[in-house]
Image: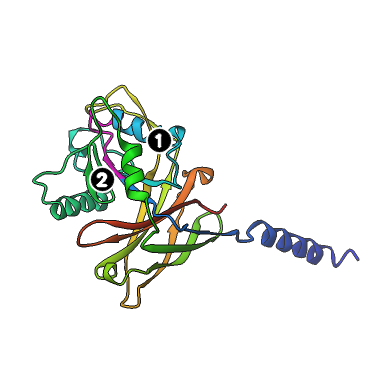
Amino acid sequence: MIRNGPQLVAAIMMALAATSTQAATCSAESGAQRVALLELYTSEGCNSCPPTDRWVSELPRRGITPERVVTLAFHVDYWNYLGWPDPFSSAQFSERQRMASLRNRARVVYTPQLLLNGRDYRRGAVFDDFGERLKALGGGPAPARISLQMQTDGPAGLGVTGTATVADTAARGGAQAYLALYENNLSNDVSAGENRGKRLRHDFVVRELAGPYPVNPGGEARLQHRFSLDPRWKSGDLHVAAFVQSARSGDVLQALASPACR
């Protein structure tokens, strides 16, 4: 009995380890109505960005939830030279903004910028018409459907698979799908640059963008990506988003957001 003690302890430890690392799985699927995509291009090095960041963060409290619009905040890197390197910034996000500007025949890129379904959206100085704009975009059935399956890969990974199906034959040409991992409830004390001395708060901060996944002639894009999770990221505030967008016009056919599996 004593001789078997170490083997028994080892078996118990292995069983506990297997239980603690058991993968969590979850799924999400878009509904029948079209959901819009709101993109924010921002930077902690830009002193005109905080008010728009706050406006974006307040959308859920106004009842503008992911069931109506999927919001993604892309922090660009072209303000970093001013002395404050935005820790959330990426050259990939700056390039995405430049491509959208070329598509929209804009002469410059700027922050803060809002794109609603690929088109420049400017908030009114007096009247905020965002809710009305969403109603106009969300009417009628969605031209595409998105289905996602998520599975944790230990504490450091999240695997996402799924499909994006475009029912409208005319919309399939040039359609592409994307996956994004974003985090809410972030804050940072800025010690240099235009926002020196300010504590900035952010939501919908894109940690990683994967894609594009092309839509094939049959109208389907197969989605697959493993997100590597930084231990500093808060698992309870991580979400996965997916959207289908026309590479030609920038129009978003459908969008979906869901809390990440934990």
User: Residue visible at 30% across and 26% down?
Assistant: 191
Cα distance in 3D space between marks 1 and 2:
15 Å
Q: Local crowd at mark 2 within 10 Å, few (<14), some, or many (≥20)?
A: some
- The front one of 167 and 52 is 167
Tell me the number on the disc at residue 115.
2
Location of mark 1 (residue): 59
In the rendered view, tell whether residue 101 sits above or below residue 63.
Answer: below
Q: Position of residue 70 (x, y in %)?
A: 39, 48
x and y percent of residue 200 in the render? 35, 29
Q: Say which element carries label 1.
A: loop
Q: Is residue 130 visible?
A: yes
Q: Amino acid at mark 2?
A: Leu
Name the foreground residue: 183 vs 218: 218
Magenta range: 39-50
Q: Quadrant of residue 203?
A: top left
Which callout, 1 or 2, points at the residue further toward the start of the chain?
1
Rendered image quadrant of residue 236: top right
> Is residue 49 magenta-colored?
yes
The vertical placement of 261 against 123, above or below, is below
| Residue 24 place in picture, x, y as percent | 60, 58
